[in-house]
């Protein structure tokens, strides 16, 4: 296949189109190729590096770390994925998205250095972020793991501290179909003699065993760090540090205190190398922003964006919806990929939706709106939601005053209306026409569902 000749000043869109066709497969786990190119590029970060892995909660944890460290006057680089609207969201420098020219300059360097080796889209992105962080001499680099941990491109870097936010089954074809298998893969971001933070309240034994095997400094939620709170404020308690009278994070959701606690445990474990005053913690938690994570759009009707795309995340979304005041009608705009646990996600939302608007997605893993609607009909006809509706994070958080736990084994809304549409935007437009000012619209199921609708909603509000 003949590829175009691209240069540092070529457009970002041209580069991204090129990256999508360069490697034979979109996902090719393994560190051999990317490590070789990284060595050719002489990538050596002098920054403090925090790697964040887990099934859900990674993005929120990265956002809170970023906001706190910026409030403490550190120079911070964040690498996260995937993006919602613009590719530039993946690479942030001091709280701002990297500019097109900054990214394409690094792409050109990588393309020259790789020679005959091909790299995936994600591997190119990872190297570009690392090169930018090195070039900009950031004080702290926060790196979000893309998939798993052991063979993820981010794992070529030896982190000073590693965080695992949660462990559940997702990407089973790559990581295994049990929590024990998934935990073992994710645990490989841990390093010997370095802090390893686990915020999952019930970590599988395989993760504990691996941490002990390599001699990582394991910090466990409920043992080495925890949180407490009332309706007004909360407090973090770690091994040697307590941070009291904290306002609740700006990021919404019952599970955000677990993510915040993990972030604060990481910062405590890195003290005194990273000194973070109490005021920076307070300010950062209030400033942290993460689009598409239980994001409530201002105005009427109430519109909620959440990228929940697996049962674990859907359980947390379900609890967050239950903690809101009641609405006459809740309309779901949902689109999902075939390789996800579609029925599991639907089951965890089944008691909360009055009208399902199922949207078709594009791409090789896509599922049509009609196919998704058939899954919804099947789950609703079963009449029961699973007994394990609560995600571990949601279950732990449900004991906070004012937070109601999700009901278990509730009868689903078999009478709900189910419709299908050719795209997320068409489904969203239909939802807006149907909803009254007092109703609620929930957009979820995938980044590819939330992103286009969030972009359209932002365009609508700015016009």
Image (tube, helix red, strand yellow):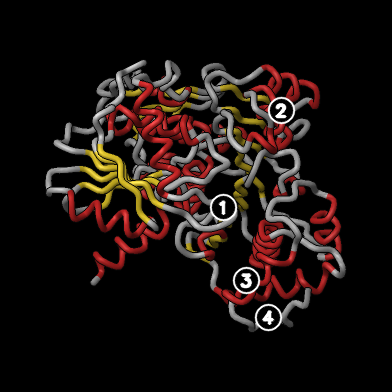
Which of the 4 image quarters holds residue 417? top left
What secondary structure is marked by label 4?
Answer: loop
Q: Is residue 100 above or below residue 89?
A: below
x and y percent of residue 100 in the render? 56, 74
| Nearest to viewer (mark 3 / mark 4) | 3
Q: Earlier in the sequence, mark 1 or mark 2?
A: 1
Please report contact status of discs 1 and 2: CB closer than 8 Å, yes or no.
Answer: no
The dot on residue 433 is none
Tell me if 324 is positioned left or right of 31 in this view.
left
What secondary structure is marked by label 3?
Answer: helix
Residue at x-position 75% and y-position 24%: 210
Residue at x-position 33% and y-position 63%: 456
Q: Which residue is mark 3?
A: 17
Q: Which residue is mark 1?
A: 80
What secondary structure is marked by label 2?
Answer: helix
Q: Earlier in the sequence, mark 2 or mark 4?
A: 4
> Disc 1 and disc 2: Cα gap in Å?
22 Å
Q: Is 290 or 377 nearer to us in this picture? A: 377
> Disc 2 and disc 4: Cα gap in Å?
39 Å
x and y percent of residue 415 in the render? 24, 30
Label 2 neighbour load within 10 Å: few <14, some 14-19, many 20+: many
Q: Which residue is mark 4?
A: 8
């Amino acid at each position: 296949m003949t590829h175009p000749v691209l240069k540092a000043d070529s457009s970002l869109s041209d580069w991204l189109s090129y990256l999508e066709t360069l490697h034979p497969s979109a996902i090719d786990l393994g560190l051999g190729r990317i490590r070789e190119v990284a060595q050719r590029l002489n990538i050596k970060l002098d920054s403090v590096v925090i790697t964040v892995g887990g099934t859900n909660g990674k993005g929120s944890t990265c956002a809170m770390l970023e906001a706190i460290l910026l409030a403490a006057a550190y120079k911070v680089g964040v690498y996260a994925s995937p993006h919602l609207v613009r590719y530039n969201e993946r690479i942030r420098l001091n709280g701002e998205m990297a500019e097109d020219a900054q990214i394409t300059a690094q792409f050109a360097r990588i393309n020259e250095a790789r020679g005959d080796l091909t790299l995936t889209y994600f591997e190119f992105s990872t190297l570009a972020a690392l090169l930018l962080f090195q070039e900009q001499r950031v004080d702290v680099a926060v790196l979000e793991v893309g998939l798993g941990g052991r063979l993820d491109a981010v794992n070529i870097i030896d982190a000073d501290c590693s965080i695992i936010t949660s462990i559940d089954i997702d990407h089973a074809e790559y990581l295994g179909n049990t929590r024990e298998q998934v935990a073992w893969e994710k645990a490989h971001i841990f390093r010997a003699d370095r802090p390893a933070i686990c915020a999952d309240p019930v970590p599988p034994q395989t993760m504990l065993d691996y941490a002990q095997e390599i001699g990582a400094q394991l910090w466990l939620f409920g043992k080495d760090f925890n949180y407490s709170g009332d309706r007004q404020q909360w407090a973090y308690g770690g091994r040697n540090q307590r941070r009291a009278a904290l306002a609740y994070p700006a990021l919404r959701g019952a599970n955000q205190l677990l993510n915040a606690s993990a972030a604060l445990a990481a910062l405590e474990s890195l003290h005194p190398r990273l000194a973070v005053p109490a005021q920076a913690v307070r300010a950062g938690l209030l400033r942290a922003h993460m689009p598409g994570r239980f994001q409530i759009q201002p105005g009427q009707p109430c519109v909620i964006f959440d990228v929940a795309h697996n049962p674990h995340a859907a359980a947390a979304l379900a609890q967050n919806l239950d903690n809101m005041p009641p609405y006459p009608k809740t309309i779901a705009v949902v689109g999902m990929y075939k390789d996800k646990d579609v029925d599991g996600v639907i089951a965890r939302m089944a008691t909360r939706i009055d009208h399902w608007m199922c949207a078709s997605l594009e791409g090789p893993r896509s599922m049509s709106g009609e196919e998704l609607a058939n899954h919804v009909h099947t789950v609703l006809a079963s009449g029961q939601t699973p007994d394990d509706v609560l995600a571990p994070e949601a279950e732990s958080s449900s004991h906070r005053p004012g937070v109601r736990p999700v009901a278990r084994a509730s009868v689903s809304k078999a009478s709900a209306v189910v419709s299908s549409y050719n795209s997320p935007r068409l489904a969203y437009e239909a939802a807006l026409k149907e909803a009254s000012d007092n109703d609620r619209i929930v957009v979820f199921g995938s980044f590819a569902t939330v992103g286009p609708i969030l972009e359209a909603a932002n365009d609508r509000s700015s016009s």
